[in-house]
Image: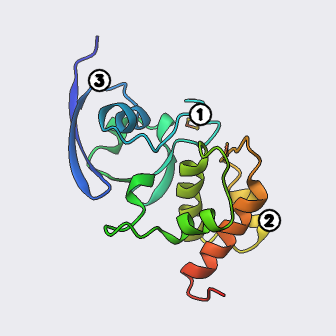
Protein backbone atom coordinates (compact mmCIF):
# COMPACT_ATOMS: atom_id res chain seq x y z
CA UNK A 1 0.00 0.00 0.00
CA UNK A 2 1.35 3.36 -0.89
CA UNK A 3 1.23 6.26 1.51
CA UNK A 4 -1.51 8.77 0.84
CA UNK A 5 -0.62 12.20 -0.39
CA UNK A 6 -2.50 15.47 -0.11
CA UNK A 7 -2.80 17.63 -3.17
CA UNK A 8 -4.43 20.92 -3.92
CA UNK A 9 -6.26 21.60 -7.15
CA UNK A 10 -8.35 24.52 -8.36
CA UNK A 11 -11.31 22.75 -9.91
CA UNK A 12 -13.89 24.87 -11.73
CA UNK A 13 -12.70 27.88 -9.73
CA UNK A 14 -12.95 26.17 -6.35
CA UNK A 15 -9.95 25.11 -4.32
CA UNK A 16 -10.06 21.42 -3.44
CA UNK A 17 -7.76 19.49 -1.13
CA UNK A 18 -7.62 15.79 -1.76
CA UNK A 19 -5.92 13.11 0.28
CA UNK A 20 -5.47 10.23 -2.09
CA UNK A 21 -3.35 7.28 -3.08
CA UNK A 22 -0.69 8.67 -5.45
CA UNK A 23 -1.85 6.20 -8.11
CA UNK A 24 -5.28 7.85 -8.41
CA UNK A 25 -5.83 9.34 -11.84
CA UNK A 26 -7.27 12.78 -12.31
CA UNK A 27 -10.31 11.08 -13.87
CA UNK A 28 -10.98 8.97 -10.79
CA UNK A 29 -10.22 11.90 -8.48
CA UNK A 30 -12.93 13.90 -10.24
CA UNK A 31 -15.48 11.10 -10.44
CA UNK A 32 -14.95 9.18 -7.23
CA UNK A 33 -13.53 11.75 -4.84
CA UNK A 34 -15.30 14.92 -5.96
CA UNK A 35 -18.49 13.44 -7.42
CA UNK A 36 -17.93 15.36 -10.63
CA UNK A 37 -19.26 12.56 -12.80
CA UNK A 38 -19.61 14.57 -16.01
CA UNK A 39 -16.14 13.48 -17.05
CA UNK A 40 -16.55 9.96 -18.43
CA UNK A 41 -14.44 6.81 -18.56
CA UNK A 42 -14.77 5.06 -21.89
CA UNK A 43 -11.50 3.14 -21.93
CA UNK A 44 -9.10 4.29 -19.17
CA UNK A 45 -6.22 3.83 -21.66
CA UNK A 46 -6.09 7.09 -23.59
CA UNK A 47 -7.94 5.81 -26.64
CA UNK A 48 -11.43 7.32 -26.55
CA UNK A 49 -11.28 10.91 -25.27
CA UNK A 50 -14.40 10.61 -23.07
CA UNK A 51 -12.29 11.77 -20.12
CA UNK A 52 -11.04 15.00 -21.74
CA UNK A 53 -10.74 17.95 -19.33
CA UNK A 54 -8.64 21.10 -19.30
CA UNK A 55 -5.59 21.42 -17.09
CA UNK A 56 -4.18 24.94 -17.04
CA UNK A 57 -6.17 25.71 -20.17
CA UNK A 58 -4.97 22.74 -22.23
CA UNK A 59 -7.05 19.69 -23.12
CA UNK A 60 -5.72 16.51 -21.53
CA UNK A 61 -6.89 12.94 -21.12
CA UNK A 62 -7.63 12.72 -17.42
CA UNK A 63 -7.35 8.90 -17.46
CA UNK A 64 -3.67 9.24 -18.36
CA UNK A 65 -3.01 12.08 -15.92
CA UNK A 66 -2.32 11.33 -12.29
CA UNK A 67 -4.18 13.69 -10.00
CA UNK A 68 -0.79 14.38 -8.42
CA UNK A 69 0.58 15.61 -11.76
CA UNK A 70 -1.99 18.37 -11.72
CA UNK A 71 -0.92 19.48 -8.21
CA UNK A 72 -1.43 23.22 -7.83
CA UNK A 73 -3.05 23.43 -11.24
CA UNK A 74 -6.32 24.73 -12.56
CA UNK A 75 -8.72 22.06 -13.81
CA UNK A 76 -11.88 22.75 -15.77
CA UNK A 77 -14.47 20.03 -16.31
CA UNK A 78 -17.75 20.03 -18.18
CA UNK A 79 -19.50 21.09 -14.96
CA UNK A 80 -17.46 24.29 -14.92
CA UNK A 81 -18.09 25.38 -18.48
CA UNK A 82 -21.38 27.23 -18.07
CA UNK A 83 -21.06 30.58 -16.34
CA UNK A 84 -22.06 31.19 -12.73
CA UNK A 85 -25.60 32.12 -13.77
CA UNK A 86 -25.93 28.82 -15.64
CA UNK A 87 -25.64 30.36 -19.10
CA UNK A 88 -24.28 27.68 -21.38
CA UNK A 89 -20.92 28.07 -23.10
CA UNK A 90 -21.40 28.64 -26.87
CA UNK A 91 -20.00 25.16 -27.57
CA UNK A 92 -22.60 23.64 -25.27
CA UNK A 93 -25.50 25.55 -26.84
CA UNK A 94 -24.25 24.79 -30.37
CA UNK A 95 -24.03 21.06 -29.54
CA UNK A 96 -27.67 21.23 -28.46
CA UNK A 97 -28.82 23.30 -31.42
CA UNK A 98 -27.10 20.95 -33.88
CA UNK A 99 -28.05 17.64 -32.22
CA UNK A 100 -24.36 16.85 -31.85
CA UNK A 101 -25.00 14.00 -29.41
CA UNK A 102 -27.26 11.02 -28.95
CA UNK A 103 -26.44 8.92 -25.87
CA UNK A 104 -24.40 11.78 -24.44
CA UNK A 105 -21.56 9.66 -23.06
CA UNK A 106 -18.82 11.02 -25.30
CA UNK A 107 -20.31 14.52 -25.15
CA UNK A 108 -18.52 16.06 -22.15
CA UNK A 109 -15.19 15.02 -23.65
CA UNK A 110 -16.23 16.19 -27.11
CA UNK A 111 -17.27 19.57 -25.73
CA UNK A 112 -14.11 20.08 -23.64
CA UNK A 113 -12.06 19.07 -26.65
CA UNK A 114 -14.02 21.38 -28.94
CA UNK A 115 -13.52 24.38 -26.65
CA UNK A 116 -9.77 23.74 -26.75
CA UNK A 117 -9.81 22.98 -30.49
CA UNK A 118 -11.34 26.40 -31.17
CA UNK A 119 -8.94 28.14 -28.79
CA UNK A 120 -5.97 26.42 -30.44
CA UNK A 121 -7.11 27.86 -33.80
CA UNK A 122 -7.91 24.43 -35.23
CA UNK A 123 -11.48 25.12 -36.34
CA UNK A 124 -10.63 26.74 -39.67
CA UNK A 125 -12.35 24.20 -41.92
CA UNK A 126 -14.46 21.05 -41.70
CA UNK A 127 -11.37 18.95 -42.43
CA UNK A 128 -9.34 20.68 -39.75
CA UNK A 129 -12.13 20.26 -37.19
CA UNK A 130 -12.41 16.57 -38.06
CA UNK A 131 -8.65 16.10 -37.70
CA UNK A 132 -8.32 17.99 -34.42
CA UNK A 133 -11.44 16.38 -32.94
CA UNK A 134 -10.37 12.89 -33.99
CA UNK A 135 -9.12 12.05 -30.50
CA UNK A 136 -12.74 11.89 -29.34
CA UNK A 137 -14.63 8.79 -30.39
CA UNK A 138 -18.41 8.76 -30.76
CA UNK A 139 -20.07 5.42 -31.14
CA UNK A 140 -23.42 7.06 -31.90
CA UNK A 141 -21.89 8.50 -35.05
CA UNK A 142 -22.70 12.13 -34.30
CA UNK A 143 -19.56 13.30 -36.11
CA UNK A 144 -21.20 15.35 -38.91
CA UNK A 145 -23.29 17.21 -36.34
CA UNK A 146 -20.29 17.71 -34.09
CA UNK A 147 -18.42 19.37 -36.97
CA UNK A 148 -21.39 21.69 -37.56
CA UNK A 149 -21.61 22.53 -33.84
CA UNK A 150 -17.91 23.29 -33.58
CA UNK A 151 -18.01 25.44 -36.72
CA UNK A 152 -20.97 27.41 -35.45
CA UNK A 153 -19.49 27.86 -31.97
CA UNK A 154 -16.18 29.01 -33.44
CA UNK A 155 -18.04 31.62 -35.49
CA UNK A 156 -20.01 32.79 -32.46
CA UNK A 157 -16.92 32.99 -30.33
CA UNK A 158 -15.09 35.05 -32.93
CA UNK A 159 -18.02 37.46 -32.89
CA UNK A 160 -19.31 36.92 -36.40
CA UNK A 161 -22.22 34.62 -35.67
CA UNK A 162 -24.76 34.53 -38.44
S1 LIG B 1 -11.19 7.17 -20.72
FE1 LIG B 1 -9.52 8.45 -21.13
S2 LIG B 1 -9.20 8.26 -23.25
FE2 LIG B 1 -10.78 6.81 -22.83
S1 LIG C 1 -23.22 10.58 -28.43
FE1 LIG C 1 -23.13 8.46 -27.94
S2 LIG C 1 -21.04 8.00 -28.10
FE2 LIG C 1 -21.17 10.00 -28.85
Q: Position of residue 92 (x, y in %)?
A: 54, 64
**Disc marking residue 127:** 2
Marks 3 and 1, how far apart at CA:
22 Å
Which secondary structure lies at badge 1? loop
Q: Residues within 10 Å of mark 1 (few under 14, many from 20)?
A: some
* Above or below, comparing residue 26 to residue 79 in the picture: above
- Figure quadrant of the C terminus: bottom right
Q: Which quadrant: the N terminus?
A: top left
**Side (left or right) of 162 relative to 44:** right
Q: Is residue 14 left or right of residue 55?
A: left
Q: How many marks?
A: 3
Q: Are marks 2 and 1 in contact (CB under 8 Å)?
A: no
- The quarter of the displayed image where residue 130 is located: bottom right
Can you tell me which quadrant of the image ligand 1 is in? top right
Label 1 lies in ligand 1 vicinity (Cβ under 8 Å) = yes
Q: Which residue is mark 3?
A: 21
User: How far across and how far down the image is residue 8, in percent?
Assistant: 22, 44
The verdict on label 2 being within 8 Å of ligand 2 is no
* Secondary structure found at label 3: loop
- Find disc 1 in the rendering and name its residue: 42
Amino acid sequence: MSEKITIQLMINDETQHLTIDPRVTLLDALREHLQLTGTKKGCDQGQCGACTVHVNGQRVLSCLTLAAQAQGGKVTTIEGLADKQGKLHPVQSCFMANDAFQCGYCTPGQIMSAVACIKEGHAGSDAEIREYMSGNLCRCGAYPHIVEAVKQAAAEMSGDAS
